[in-house]
Image (tube, rainbow, N blue to C red):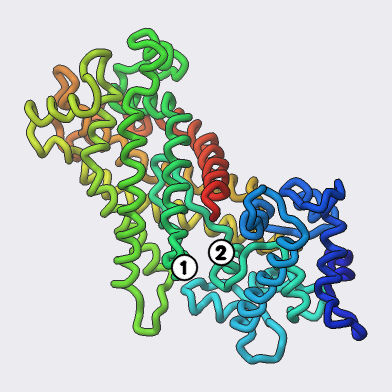
Amino acid sequence: MFDLARRLLLPSATCEPSEPQTRYAELFSKLDVNKDGKVDILELQQGLRSMGMAVGRGAEEKIVAAGDTNKDGQLDFAEFIKYLEDHEKKMKIAFTSLDKNEDGKIEASEIMNSLKILGINISSDHATKILQSMDADGTLTVDWNEWRDHFLFNPADNIEEIIRYWKHSTVLDIGDSLTIPDEFTEEEKKTGQWWRQLLSGAMAGAVSRTGTAPLDRLKVMMQVHGTKGNSNMLAGLKQMVKEGGIRSLWRGNGVNVIKIAPETAMKFWAYEQYKKMFTSESGKLGTAERFIAGSLAGATAQTSIYPMEVLKTRLAVGKTGQYDGMFDCAKKILKKEGVRAFYKGYIPNILGIIPYAGIDLAVYETLKNNWLQKYATDSANPGILVLLACGTVSSTCGQLASYPLALIRTRMQAQASIEGAPQLNMGGLFRNIIAKEGLLGLYRGIAPNFLKVLPAVSISYVVYEKMKVQLGI
């Protein structure tokens, strides 16, 4: 795959002291398609693709951003040389940190042990797949030249970033997801990368939720009104438009977007604190501990912003003119029902975290790992379509398990605003729904909920990647 790159990059026995610069010059010439003395993002994409060099998503943008000292959006020859020289030094450090027995080669066992130290357990077959993605001569080991060629145009230049490249984990927000947060490296914390990732995730969530808000409001209306509501989705959308116009489809979305930032920040902060509590004396954090820490972090975040969840539901089911916005809604609830009203439905909401987060995480990791075991030959990095498919299926499974609790939560949040509705607790609502609507009544509104998953994940992923590029992540 990397034959052309190797002919340009591997040193020969008779090379002169300036040979690295000569190799870089030849490579620059290959990439500079229009021969203007500069290489832009498009030329990098076309050139690397033509040489068969696999790079991570958004790598070309990151390379230009890292090497572009004069900020003209391109790399001239001097910038190109400087970037590659600096990048090679960092890659050498990463290679040495993996080469535990100092024999100049990386083996599958060394990859497994390095990941295990960071609390990531992979099988021998999985480690071999990763190794094979870099192994050019079929020895099932990777020497410095193979390592350098593989990562020369991948901006991951320390061991934590390289492991992230192998894991290909992302921070995605699809509205109801309580998946365990991704972890930040010490380097990311020191350099301020963490807040850029949080900001990217928050922006992705805001755009994603806004794009799918009509389906979300339709889901809430179907959950709350039960058999009284129209079960036909198209008719339900028409009824909402008839009652309040096109803008009514986004009623409650403002609160939904506003709560993303504090919820995300609280989730990541709490996750870091819980990780410290569960980390063993050896400094390791296993899968079970990571799941417990993530679930507790989700519960903590939900507790901190739960009153906004109640406001979102009340605004979504409210009629046109009933509330003059979020603050008016909060004031009326406080005056009429008291402070406790802001935590109605809290118990089923917290109970729903465990089945959702557990099943979502387990299914996602299982599907992704199975794909890696069976199909990852040239790269240990599954493509966007694979990740979207895994995320969609895992989220769907998680929602199937936790949806009845989500429905009960929404009913409890909204029942005080429905005229003539009995004020029931969690158990009473379960019995009432099953008696009047049957078991299927516990899944009312799940159709629009499922419809929003794929577009929500897709929008979130695209916006997240674009934001990362803009913020220089």
How many marks the image carries: the answer is 2
Q: Residue at x 58, y 72 (%)?
A: 158
Query: Eyeballing the image, is 297 above or below 215?
Result: below
Q: With 340 as the anchor, is 158 left or right in this view? A: right
What residue sits 47% from the left and 73% below the top?
A: 119
The location of residue 82, given as percent across then percent down, is 70, 67
Mark 1 and mark 2: Cα distance apart in space:
10 Å
Q: Quadrant of the C terminus?
A: bottom right
Disc 2 residue crowd, few under 14, some 14–19, many 20+, Cα 10 Å: some
Label 2 amino acid?
Answer: Arg
Mark 1 vs mark 2: in front: 1
Q: Position of residue 264 (x, y in %)?
A: 36, 49
* Rendered residue at 14%/18% (across/down): 420
**Based on the displayed image, in which of its 4 quarters is residue 409 positioned?**
top left
Left or right position of 234 against 86: left
**CA neighbours of label 1 inside 10 A, class few (<14), some (14 to 19), many (20+):** few
Residue 382 visible here: no
Instruction: Give the residue furthest to the top.
Output: 242
Which residue corresponds to mark 2? 164
Q: Circles 1 and 2: CB distance less than 8 Å? A: yes
Residue 173 bears which disc, if any?
Answer: none
Residue 70 x %, y %: 64, 54
In the rendered image, is residue 53 in sight?
yes
Observer-nearest of 3 and 355? 3
The residue that label 1 is drawn on is 185
Establish if 411 lies above or below 138: above
183 versus 429 height, above or below: below
